Image (spheres, rainbow, N blue to C red):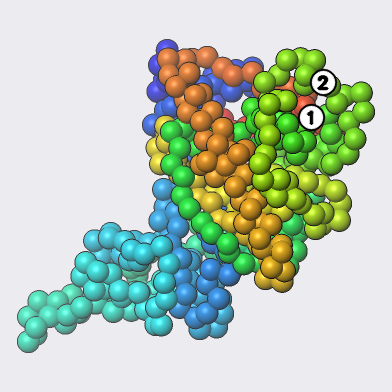
Amino acid sequence: MDALHHSRSAAGLWPQGSAARVPYWVYQDEENYKREQQRIFEGPTWNFVCLESDIPDKGDYRTNVIGSLPVIVVRDADGRINCFENRCAHRGALIALDDSGNVQNNFKCIYHAWSYDLAGNLRGIAFERGINGVGGMPKDFRRDQFGPRKLRTTALGGLVFATLSPDTPPIEEYLGAEILGRVKRVLNRPIKIMGRFVQPLPNNWKLYVENVKDTYHASLLHLFFTTFHISRLTQGGGVLVSPDGGHHASYTIGMPEGANAVAYRDQGIRSESDDYRLLDTRLLDSVDEFGDRIQLQMLTIFPACIVQQINNCLAVRQVVPRGPGRMDLHWTYLGFVDDSPDMTRRRLTQQNLVGPAGFVSMEDGCVGGFVQRGIAAAGGEVSVVEMGGETTESQATRATEASVRGFWKAYRRYMGY
């Protein structure tokens, strides 16, 4: 049975009805991918679009993508943040071409010079009345009946989210109390942007989201984490999963491992190495800036936003689907406005941990592609996601896949599977 048939019949073919078994066709099928755009990214979800500090003044804007939907996010004269589809109502061209910029009063489409105000309303049409009374638009044409789609916006901890759906609940309700608290734990004061880039990856977008939620892999794949005791399963920590399954926060507490300190070596796991040394140990110079000994916290907001704290390296990652088998990862490095010069230097140094060539996340850029290639002929097979059982509840351990199962619980609900 091919992958296409599986996607059309998915409601009855999800193995055992369990989030602990995931069919591989969901990472491959074009029809399923299109359904995701409509039911998830354009559905009742909150999607990260920019930072408040990206657009501090009237007319400041950034462009972004929600799934496959291009959007403009802009601050208006009253200080409100508006978001609307980056699509001209005339012939469908992009209205704004740059990643960011400032327009004082309106956006103007380069194709035929139709213009839009800072709320996305169609305000001007070039030669609307024609020339010398000939040509132009019909007299009964009404601008207010045409325009790009408008999205609701909300802000949390300096992050801006948008949704097309009128049914998306307030962001606080959407996240739930525990995950909301974990966002506020890190983003607890005005933030500044320290850098950004885009990383193309050769895998389905869901494989990357799963990977971030997968606390089981972190100290098995990443030699740096294990060797330098940044995140080991034998340290303290756990996984929080929102009641709906979609959002999670995993955390590692720096603490003595006791008799478990030799567990990786005893199992011959490659991620602990006596030969791996740092010539510049400033990379490990971290401070407990949040006062709770949590040296790593990874947090996901369904469907595609990640808030990262690895020691003092802070970042927001946005997953952007580009087709069934590829995606872009948008990275934004963060600091705080009140950071001292020493803390700024520390954050800049620790940013070498992550990114395409990061000491840690270099491997994450590879493994999604390894899976995509490994399942190429296995559309009818399933993955086994059963570490820590079959439930999606929070657990006081990271030797679990509870938050991965939580993602599939939420995914199936949005997709109607």
Q: Which residue is mark 1?
A: 233
Foreground residue, 396 or 278? 278
Q: Quadrant of residue 12?
A: top right
Regarding residue 298, the answer to whether it shows in the image is: yes
Indicate which disc residue 145 carries: none
Regarding residue 171, the answer to whether it shows in the image is: no
- Rendering coords of residue 234 (x, y %): 83, 29
Q: Type of residue at label 2?
A: Ala
Task: Please report whichever mark, 2 or 1, sits nearer to the chain's N-terminal start.
Answer: 1
Crowdedness near tag 1: few (<14), some (14–19) or many (≥20) residues, C-alpha within 10 Å: many
Foreground residue, 323 or 309? 309
Residue at disc 2, secondary structure: helix
- Rendering coords of residue 289 (x, y %): 80, 58
Q: Residue at x 85, y 48 (%)?
A: 293
Q: Residue at x 47, y 15 (%)?
A: 378
Q: Residue at x 43, y 67 (%)?
A: 100
Report the label total: 2
> Badges 2 and 1: C-beta atoms under 8 Å apart?
yes
Q: Residue at x 18, y 75 (%)?
A: 137
Q: Which residue is mark 2?
A: 263
Left/right of residue 224 with respect to residue 383 in the rendered view: right
Quadrant of the drawing holding the C terminus: top right
Crowdedness near tag 2: few (<14), some (14–19) or many (≥20) residues, C-alpha within 10 Å: some
Furthest residue to the bottom?
132
Foreground residue, 396 or 172? 396
Foreground residue, 297 or 394? 297
Please identify, in this view, whether the residue under mark 2 or under mark 1 is nearer the observer: 2
Query: Vertically, is 66 above or below 201?
Result: below
Quadrant of the drawing holding the N terminus: top left
